[in-house]
């Protein structure tokens, strides 16, 4: 039997992410069906911290050895991953670069992150190398645009979209934010308060509109304060038209149905397919043809989905057992 994928383990000073690749390797050994891996759910994986970047490189190297699909979302510069042999050509994967607004907005909402110019440069370089790269225009707080730019606020967004189109990216995904009024501790303010207070420093009127127009909503297991639905729908449809006029595709991020504001023909909101993969005899995985990993949408009511695991087509809570039972993967 061919040797299974392995990762180099070298002595080094222990720190927060020290054994992440080893933990992932252990999980991959246990499962038969592998979903796409998201690298960035908790913190930005491309921060300019040498130890962090070293661990992220080891993790990405591991995922490529096992041949599973993955996505990276960052405000930083993922260029260091180009040092990995085969990274640019590896499929399936995509990189999403988050850009929340103009240079003025970035300096206020994420002052410690790379500038607008640096983020755009990262998108240009990745796109030029043929890497599937999208821009997360997310979150967009329209009241903050209004506070800074008054009645010309949408022109600023038009300018950004024209700039995005020149980077080589093919897709924009956007949201207007889902906020909480709960704070992490009695000594901290909530995210909702932080956004409102930032808007208020530039416009009392815009802050009052923000307070009125971010409404509590609950859908399934998701809840929070969202931009009022009619305003949200109008904004996303307007932005979709603008994006498509610039020959890009557009999708919203868990705010509206695909039929309401997404470009037609997308498998899911992130456009680029990241399929489930099935383990092969050598321990590596092979992507499943016709799988979008958007299971409860693409394969809803399908009795024999491409992954051969009908339980995944339900919107019910996910169980790790769905990935382990070999009976479900028989032809």
Image (tube, helix red, strand yellow):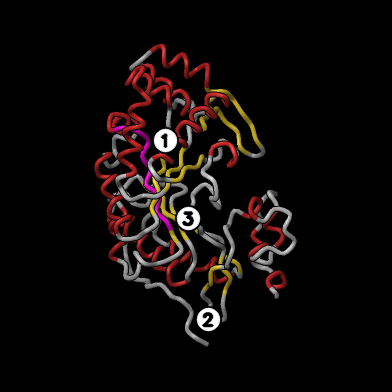
Residue that label 1 marks: 242
Would you call the spot at circle 1 few (<14 residues within 10 Å), some (14-19), or many (20 or more)?
some
Count of numbered marks: 3
| Residue at disc 1, secondary structure | helix
Would you call the spot at circle 2 few (<14 residues within 10 Å), some (14-19), or many (20 or more)?
few
The residue located at (67%, 38%) in the rendering is 220
**Label number found at residue 272:** 3
Q: Earlier in the sequence, mark 1 or mark 3?
A: 1
Dots 2 and 1: beta carbons under 8 Å?
Answer: no
Q: Estimate the x, y position of residue 321 in percent, counting from the top left.
A: 67, 62
Q: Earlier in the sequence, mark 2 or mark 1?
A: 1
Residue that label 2 marks: 282
Q: Nearer the viewer, mark 1 or mark 3?
A: 1
Q: Earlier in the sequence, mark 3 or mark 2?
A: 3
Q: Estimate the x, y position of residue 69 in percent, counting from the top left.
A: 48, 63
Specify start and end residues of the magenta stretch as a single range. 94-102
Alpha carbon distance from label 3 to label 2: 27 Å
């Amino acid at each position: 039997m061919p040797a299974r994928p392995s990762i180099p383990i070298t002595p080094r000073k222990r720190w927060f992410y020290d054994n992440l690749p080893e933990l992932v390797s252990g999980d991959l050994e246990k499962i038969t069906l592998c979903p796409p891996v998201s690298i960035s759910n908790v913190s930005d994986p491309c921060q300019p911290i040498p130890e962090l970047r070293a661990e992220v490189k080891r993790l990405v190297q591991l995922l490529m050895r096992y041949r599973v699909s993955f996505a990276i979302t960052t405000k930083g510069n993922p260029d260091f991953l180009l040092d990995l042999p085969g990274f640019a050509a590896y499929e399936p994967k995509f990189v999403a670069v988050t850009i929340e607004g103009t240079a003025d907005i970035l300096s206020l909402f994420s002052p410690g992150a790379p500038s607008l110019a640096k983020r755009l440069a990262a998108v240009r370089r990745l796109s030029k190398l043929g890497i599937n790269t999208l821009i997360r225009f997310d979150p967009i707080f329209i009241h903050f645009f209004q506070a800074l730019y008054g009645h010309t606020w949408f022109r600023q967004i038009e300018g950004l979209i024209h700039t995005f189109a020149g980077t080589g990216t093919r897709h924009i995904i956007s949201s207007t934010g889902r906020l909480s009024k709960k704070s992490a501790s009695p000594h901290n303010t909530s995210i909702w308060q932080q956004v409102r207070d930032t808007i208020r420093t530039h416009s009392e009127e815009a802050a009052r509109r923000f307070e009125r127009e971010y409404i509590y909503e609950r859908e399934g297991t998701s809840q929070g304060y969202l931009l009022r639905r009619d305003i949200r729908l109008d904004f996303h449809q307007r932005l979709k038209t603008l994006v498509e006029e610039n020959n890009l595709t557009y999708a919203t991020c868990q705010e509206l149905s695909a039929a309401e504001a997404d470009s037609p023909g997308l498998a899911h909101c992130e456009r680029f397919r990241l399929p489930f993969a099935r383990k092969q005899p050598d321990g590596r995985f092979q992507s499943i043809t016709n799988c979008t990993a958007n299971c409860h949408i693409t394969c809803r009511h399908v009795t024999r989905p491409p992954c051969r695991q009908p339980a995944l087509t339900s919107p019910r809570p996910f169980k790790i057992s769905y990935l382990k039972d070999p009976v479900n993967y028989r032809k």
